[in-house]
Image (tube, grey):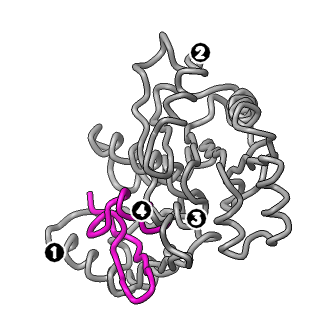
């Protein structure tokens, strides 16, 4: 498996997310910086180079990208495949970060089971509709700095300890609700899981956090142990990198899973 990283720019310095900029280093810079870093999509030439290397080894190529409604990466992947038509399968995950990750994990599981590239893609296109990605943000500051909400809305939200609960629906980010404090926000996350009729534990799922510490997500896991205890081992949360952390800031927690039923009310 090959991961092509997003470029993150702080001022005049460019970094490859997760390559020469660790998650810890990113959040330290983010917190200290007065200006929001810039994220750049992967250019077609980078995809083309990756296709060339894989095709040269005789590999079948499946590409899974962030939602085409959130980034031009899907378009870049298609442009880069110009000379490799019929050899490259490109899947728009219709999701982001954690949702994209569990779709990749599902694809790798199918690969290990001996599925062909064509059959894997067919399964991905079907199952991606069942993915739910829900997150609780700690602050509105980074949405304000990125121009996604007004300064007045951010100020009012921060004064009232408003913590938005967001999701990816139809390939785009949507606000599901606004909670007063972390406890109410955690309850909203649990309610959204219930709306999906629970988690398919035989499929990949993941919990994750942004920032320098996992204290908040560990507390969430403890407080909602009924979601996992006696079903699976205690979840090990992952750290979310700069490509997403730039836009939602530190202190956020999230979960991505395949819904137990194909109920698209939250999708």
Q: Is residue 230 left or right of residue 226?
A: left
Give residue 226's mark.
Answer: 2
**Residue that protrudes farthest toward the left in the picture:** 57
Question: In the figure, 65 relative to 145: above or below?
Answer: above
Q: Secondary structure at mark 1?
A: helix
Mark 4 vs 2, N-terminal side:
4
CB under 8 Å between discs 1 and 4: no
Please state the extent of the stretch shown in magenta in the rendering. Answer: 1-30
- Quadrant in which the N terminus appears: bottom left
Q: Nearer the viewer, mark 3 or mark 2?
A: 2
Between 99 and 244, the one lying in front of the other is 244
Q: Which residue has dot 4 on it?
A: 28
CB under 8 Å between discs 3 and 1: no
Q: Residues within 10 Å of mark 1 (few under 14, many from 20)?
A: few
Q: Which residue has dot 1 on it?
A: 56
Q: Residue at x 67, y 73 (%)?
A: 145
**Distance in Å between CA atoms under marks 1 and 2:** 49 Å
Q: Position of residue 162 (x, y in %)?
A: 79, 48
Question: In the figure, 126 relative to 216: above or below?
Answer: below
Q: Position of residue 205 (x, y in %)?
A: 48, 36
Q: Is residue 62 left or right of residue 203?
A: left
Mark 1 vs 2, N-terminal side:
1
Q: Residue at x 65, y 70 (%)?
A: 69
Please identify the quarter of the rendering in which residue 45 is found. Answer: bottom left
Q: Which residue has dot 3 on it?
A: 67
**Distance in Å between CA atoms under marks 1 and 4:** 40 Å
């Amino acid at each position: 498996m090959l991961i092509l990283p997003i470029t993150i720019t702080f001022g005049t310095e460019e970094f490859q997310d997760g390559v020469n900029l660790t998650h810890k280093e990113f959040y330290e810079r983010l917190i200290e910086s007065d200006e929001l870093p810039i994220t750049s999509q992967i250019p077609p030439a980078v995809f083309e180079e990756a296709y060339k290397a894989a095709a040269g080894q005789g590999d079948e190529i499946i590409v899974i990208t962030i939602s085409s409604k959130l980034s031009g990466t899907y378009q870049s992947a298609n442009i880069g495949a110009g000379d490799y038509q019929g050899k490259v399968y490109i899947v728009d995950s219709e999701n982001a970060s954690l949702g994209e990750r569990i779709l990749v994990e599902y694809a790798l599981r199918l690969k290990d089971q001996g599925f062909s590239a064509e059959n894997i893609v067919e399964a991905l296109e079907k199952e991606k509709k069942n993915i739910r990605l829900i997150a609780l943000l700690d602050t509105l500051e980074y949405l304000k700095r990125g121009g996604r909400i007004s300064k007045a809305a951010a100020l009012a939200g921060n004064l009232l300890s408003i913590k938005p609960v967001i999701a990816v629906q139809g390939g785009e980010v949507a606000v599901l609700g606004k909670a007063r404090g972390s406890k109410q926000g955690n309850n909203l996350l649990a309610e959204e899981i219930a709306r999906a009729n629970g988690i398919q534990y035989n499929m990949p799922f993941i919990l994750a956090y942004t920032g320098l510490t996992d204290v908040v997500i560990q507390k969430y896991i403890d407080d909602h142990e009924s979601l996992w205890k006696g079903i699976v081992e205690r979840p090990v949360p992952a750290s979310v990198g700069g490509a997403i952390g730039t836009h939602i800031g530190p202190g956020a927690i999230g979960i991505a899973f395949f819904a137990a039923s194909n109920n698209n009310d939250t999708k």
